[in-house]
Amino acid sequence: MDLNFTQEEEAFAEEVRAFLDKNLHPYLSEGMRATPSVFVEPDIGGEWQRILNEKGWLAYNWPREYGGTGWTPMQRYIFERECALADAPGLPVLGLKLLGPVICNFGSEKQKAVILPRVLSGENYWCQGFSEPGAGSDLANLKTRAVVKDGQYVINGQKMWTTHAHHATHIFCLVRTDPEAKPQQGISFILVDMDQPGVKVRPIIGLAGDHEVNEVFLDDAVAPLENLVGEEGQGWTIAKFLLENERGGACHAPKILSDVRKIWRAAGTEPNGFGGTMSEDQSFMGDLARAELEAQALEMTELRILAQMSKGLPPGPQTSLSKLVASDLRQQVDGLAMRLYGYSGLVLVTERPLYGNESPEPLCTKEAQLAAPRYLNSRAWSIFGGTNEVQRGIIAKMVLGL
Ligand SMILES: Cc1cc2nc3c(=O)[nH]c(=O)nc-3n(C[C@H](O)[C@H](O)[C@H](O)COP(=O)(O)OP(=O)(O)OC[C@H]3O[C@@H](n4cnc5c(N)ncnc54)[C@H](O)[C@@H]3O)c2cc1C
């Protein structure tokens, strides 16, 4: 396995850098730098999506026939790395990276023709209705029920922690269509329009004051039968495919490394409280160096997974390893930023957004203003997409064979 970039890959990196130089407007990168939440808001994410779509560089994990880029996994990594270094906004993951590949693989011809172009254009904004109050790690316990009545699905239940449901036009849901079948076998994957009387969204405000997640109540919500993806009872298989896509081929290291480097730079000027700078604080610098080394090791692991995918092999359960390490590192790095900014980072500003003309003036610096909400929001990393404990369980069973 050769993890060095080839000449073509180096040339591709150059092409991406040139594109970013020309097309990534400063207000988008400033917006990204000043986003303390996990997901970026649609105002900057949507604009960046439009720019990438125009270039044909949006859907890199879709097959080319449906509008995908046709990039190798290594090109995807290079693209992610350059975007992270340039502070490009994150893209709407749920429609683009999760639902898109599901529709390409399991969708009907009509679903492919209607849904995929609207995901690309941003006309439809999707959220993910998997988790419920009694079904998070134990997703097979989900209770939301869909029955066929008068030629359509009628859906009742509650979804939980639904990211950006308040922005979404549609939600893809796991629902129980057969309560008699074994838990995993009675589940189906159904697409639901949010704009109907049977769908209610209630905000959940996070630790740092951000409104990212919601409760979604489905109370006699309806969906046409043609909104079933795959077959009835195939929902679990589709969910596993989606979750593997969510964890697999993810490129967390570039963003973490880019943030570590920002801390290195700032350590040269931030005061240490004893007349010097934080770069003279050996304990701090030792922890920062350790985090950077771990992030470099994570990068190698992610590249190894991508090299495996280049050979047509699935990302496999070792993606749990990269999700686990990335979550730990994300929290470590945001903790280091808190130490870096000391007292000036302690003020928790809850107004949003923290970019643009309306953003509140920082007491000290913009970077210090972002430290506390970032630190608090990074707690979510060890929960979403499968908790750290669940990832460890998968690693023990599927990777180590324990
Ligand atoms: C910011 C954020 C955004 C999210 N966005 C979405 C979204 O858009 N759509 C969506 O469907 N869901 C979303 N989620 C939900 C997320 O997937 C769940 O929170 C997660 O799967 C954990 O489920 P839970 O919260 O029910 O916790 P539980 O499953 O109840 O877990 C509670 C504790 O028990 C531990 N535990 C559970 N099972 C095991 C086990 N087998 N072995 C060891 N320990 C175990 C867990 O690790 C955890 O510490 C989001 C969550 C967060 C925090």
Image (cartoon, rainbow, N blue to C red):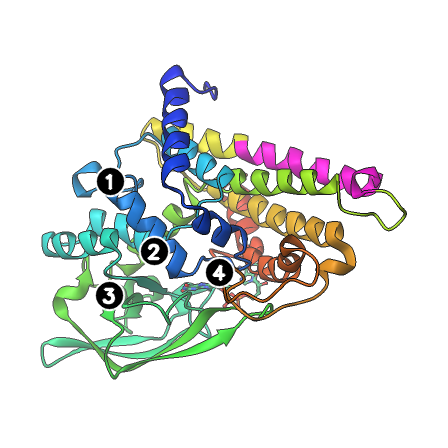
Asked if labels 4 and 2 touch by Cβ distance under 8 angstroms, the answer is no
Task: Please name the amino acid that badge 1 sits on.
Answer: Gly
Q: Secondary structure at mark 1?
A: loop
Nearest-to-viewer mark from 4 and 1: 4
Nearest-to-viewer mark from 3 and 1: 1
Task: Please name the amino acid that badge 3 sits on.
Answer: Ile
Q: How far apart are labels 4 and 1 at the CA level? A: 32 Å
Task: Please name the amino acid that badge 2 sits on.
Answer: Gly
Task: Please name the amino acid that badge 4 sits on.
Answer: Gly
Asked if labels 1 and 4 touch by Cβ distance under 8 angstroms, the answer is no
Question: Magenta stretch?
Answer: 277-299
Q: How far apart are labels 2 and 1 at the CA level? A: 18 Å
Q: Residues within 10 Å of mark 4 (few under 14, many from 20)?
A: few
Q: Earlier in the sequence, mark 2 or mark 4?
A: 2
Q: Is residue 283 magenta?
A: yes
Q: How far apart are labels 2 and 4 at the CA level? A: 16 Å
Q: Earlier in the sequence, mark 2 or mark 1?
A: 2
Q: Which residue is label 4 attached to?
A: 356
The spot of residue 95 in percent (x, y) is 31, 56
Is 353 left, or right, of 269 in this rendering? left
Query: Magenta stretch mostly in which secondary structure?
Result: helix
Q: Which residue is label 3 attached to?
A: 190
Q: Residue at x 39, y 65 (%)?
A: 140
Nearest-to-viewer mark from 2 and 1: 2
Q: Earlier in the sequence, mark 3 or mark 4?
A: 3
Quarter location, residue 14 = top left
Is 150 left, or right, of 189 in this rendering? left
Q: Residue at x 36, y 49 (%)?
A: 48
Quadrant containing the C terminus is top right
Q: How far apart are labels 3 and 4 at the CA level? A: 38 Å
